[in-house]
């Protein structure tokens, strides 16, 4: 979607309020969500963005007859202030770990007996229950049967129709049949004879299928109902080639119309036991289940199964990390030469050039997210995006933050580096080194198997906390295998709830990305991907540590050696030696020279 004027946004809010009056609704909640509860949405379901003009991936719009507010976290505050400017929508800064603060606001601003509503087809069962509880305690009526956006969004984009294809067998560790067996074993263990899945990456992983319905995510719009002897995939028939339908049928997977998923749930036999994940199924889908069907609520088994990469998959990830790292080395070689020549460089052209170097890889499919290139003060915006019409020119000394990644047949990458343009300032070197110390600390950690991921967060933050510094985002998220760049169940963040299913297990791939953001000055974030591996077993239990997967040097010009310990310097030297060893055979002569100059021993 293109940016729209404040006049258009205000008019859309007026139309929504008219629809609210017609339905006797006092407050309407519009989350950034879809029937699959995805993080990134097809344009068809970007209702909150269409209504507000704010295009960040996280945020909730709440509209009453006299107020409109957009709740989002600190990653997006500056962006939201800019995009909401001159509209009547007020930025409501979401702080801490309270995603339902908008519901708390409603309880303080509405009167008992008023009605709060949302579209239950795009809100999870667990979230709807929490909102309902808050509404009940305040004496509100709560409705989930209201899609008020549909009638006013006249030029709404159609659902995507990109074809579905199979993940190349060379990169697949387990067949569909084997994965379905694992899932059915989990179902049997819990006493379920049916399991309903709406999350798109779970479906794609389970069936070894991929698509391109969502930008940067190789997914396709669908639901899946798995029984003991068959599975029904609810997807538009036209997206599945005939020969693929035949191969799926041989594995007991049958194609049904996408819109029939609710009818299939409603048609489950009396006495059936259905397993579903209340955080990953909408309340609208849940309500389709008849009362005589027993439901078991638990995390989707596929979330846990796909998070633990097989050894062969980790091998493929290592290979694509070499391809990805080589592409970045070639880019940085070009970038520094362009600076020396005095070429006109912008954040936008830099992002384009990074993508061009990645495309050279034979296993490259697409970007894994919209590349973030932020120069100086723009680097202080964690989710900043330069556009063709709005970007900074790189024409003076400063720091350039680049957060980028690729989708490859053999895995998904996500890396952040900060490089100096000109000579870095002492205070910039200090910040860079403190962030690097945090990354090294967590990368070097050894920890008990099954520790909750959130509990590791303090290890990376300690060097920053010791300086009275912190950052608003998490330190690490799971990474998919040619799937979503953000994947659960692990989340290295002290804001995350350390529940049992977030335990760190062997084979999980996770990011480590501490940062420092100086508003109006610069931002520093350094990010590597790591994989959990066995370390040792002692009398006290099993221990894991991390193998660093990402291969790309840190800008040694930005390091303040006096702030590092001997052990930290040794870690950097070992890492850079590994980068040289792994990438050298893949590089041009110019890039080899650049890499040697950026990885000499400290």
Image: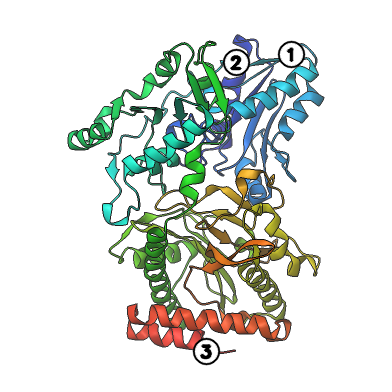
Q: Quadrant of the C terminus?
A: bottom right
Q: Please, is residue 154 above or below residue 473 in the view? A: above
For the residue carrying disc 1, how many other residues have a C-alpha within 10 Å: few (<14), some (14-19), or many (20+)?
Answer: some
Q: Secondary structure at mark 2?
A: helix
Counting from the top left corner in percent of width and height, residue 583 is at 39, 78
Q: Please, is residue 505 above or below residue 162 in the view? A: below
Q: Which residue is mark 3?
A: 600
Asked whether residue 155 appears in the rendered view, the answer is yes
For the residue carrying disc 2, how many other residues have a C-alpha within 10 Å: few (<14), some (14-19), or many (20+)?
Answer: some
Distance of label 1 from label 2 (alpha carbons) = 16 Å
Q: Secondary structure at mark 3?
A: loop
Which residue is rendered at x = 27% and y = 64% of the image?
A: 362
Counting from the top left corner in percent of width and height, residue 278 is at 58, 29
Q: Earlier in the sequence, mark 1 or mark 3?
A: 1
Which residue is rendered at x = 49% and y = 15% of the image?
A: 288
For the residue carrying disc 3, how many other residues have a C-alpha within 10 Å: few (<14), some (14-19), or many (20+)?
Answer: few
Mark seen at residue 18:
2
Counting from the top left corner in percent of width and height, residue 375 is at 57, 66
Q: Quadrant of the N terminus?
A: top left
Distance of label 1 from label 3 (alpha carbons) = 67 Å
Q: Which residue is mark 1?
A: 114
Asked whether residue 342 appears in the rendered view, the answer is no
Q: Is residue 139 left or right of residue 453?
A: right
Q: Quadrant of residue 514?
A: bottom right
Counting from the top left corner in percent of width and height, residue 551 is at 47, 72
Which residue is rendered at x = 35% and y = 79% of the image?
A: 587
Residue farthest along the left direction in this orientation: 243
């Amino acid at each position: 979607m293109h940016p729209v004027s404040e006049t258009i946004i205000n008019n859309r809010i007026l139309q929504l309020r008219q629809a609210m009056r017609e339905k006797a609704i006092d407050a309407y909640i519009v989350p950034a969500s879809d029937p699959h509860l995805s993080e990134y949405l097809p344009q068809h379901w970007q209702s909150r963005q269409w209504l507000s003009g704010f295009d960040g991936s996280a945020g909730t719009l709440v509209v009453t007859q006299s107020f409109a507010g957009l709740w989002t976290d600190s990653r997006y505050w500056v962006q939201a202030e800019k995009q909401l400017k001159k509209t009547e929508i007020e930025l409501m800064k979401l702080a801490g770990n309270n995603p339902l603060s908008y519901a708390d606001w409603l309880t303080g601003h509405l009167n008992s007996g008023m009605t709060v509503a949302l579209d239950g087809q795009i809100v999870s069962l667990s979230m709807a229950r929490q909102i309902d509880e808050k509404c009940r305690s305040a004496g509100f009526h709560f409705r989930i049967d209201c899609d008020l956006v549909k009638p006013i969004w006249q030029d709404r984009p159609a659902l995507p129709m990109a074809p579905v294809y199979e993940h190349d067998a060379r990169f697949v560790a387990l067949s569909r049949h084997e994965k379905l067996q694992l899932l059915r074993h989990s179902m049997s263990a819990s006493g379920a004879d049916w399991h309903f899945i709406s999350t798109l990456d779970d479906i794609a992983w389970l069936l070894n299928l991929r698509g391109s319905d969502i930008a940067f995510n190789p997914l396709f719009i669908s639901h899946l109902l798995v029984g003991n002897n068959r599975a029904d995939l609810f997807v538009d028939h036209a997206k599945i080639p005939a020969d693929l339908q035949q191969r799926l049928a041989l594995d007991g997977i049958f194609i049904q119309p996408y819109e029939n998923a609710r009818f299939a749930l409603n048609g489950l036999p009396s006495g059936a036991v259905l397993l579903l994940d209340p955080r990953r199924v909408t309340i609208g889908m849940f309500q389709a289940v008849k009362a005589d069907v027993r439901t078991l609520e638990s995390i989707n088994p596929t979330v846990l199964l796909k998070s633990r990469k097989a050894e062969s998959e980790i091998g493929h990830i290592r290979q694509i990390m070499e391809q990805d790292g080589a592409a970045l080395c070639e880019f940085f070689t070009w970038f520094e030469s362009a600076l020396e020549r005095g070429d006109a460089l912008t954040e936008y052209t830099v992002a384009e050039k990074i993508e061009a170097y990645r495309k050279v890889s034979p296993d490259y499919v697409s970007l894994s997210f919209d590349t973030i290139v932020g120069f100086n003060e723009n680097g202080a915006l964690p989710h900043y995006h330069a556009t063709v019409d709005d970007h900074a020119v790189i024409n003076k000394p400063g720091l350039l933050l680049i957060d980028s990644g690729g989708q490859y047949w053999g895995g998904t990458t996500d890396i952040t580096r900060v490089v100096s343009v000109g000579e870095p300032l002492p205070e910039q070197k200090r910040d860079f080194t403190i962030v690097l110390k945090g990354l090294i600390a967590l990368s070097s950690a050894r920890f008990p198997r099954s520790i909750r991921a959130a509990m590791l967060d303090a290890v990376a933050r300690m060097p920053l906390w010791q300086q009275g510094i912190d950052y608003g985002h998490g330190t690490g998220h799971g990474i998919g295998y040619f799937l979503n760049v953000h994947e659960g169940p692990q989340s290295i963040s002290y804001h995350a709830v350390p529940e049992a299913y977030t335990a760190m297990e062997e084979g999980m791939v996770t990011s480590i990305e501490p940062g420092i953001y100086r508003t109006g000055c610069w931002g520093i974030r350094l990010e590597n991907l790591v994989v959990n591996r066995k370390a040792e077993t002692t009398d006290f239990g099993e221990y894991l540590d991390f193998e660093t997967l990402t291969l790309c040097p840190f800008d040694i010009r930005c390091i303040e050696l006096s702030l590092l310990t001997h052990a930290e310097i040794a870690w950097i030297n070992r890492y850079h030696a590994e980068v040289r060893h792994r990438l050298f055979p893949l590089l041009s002569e110019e890039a080899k020279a650049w890499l040697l100059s950026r990885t000499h021993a400290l």
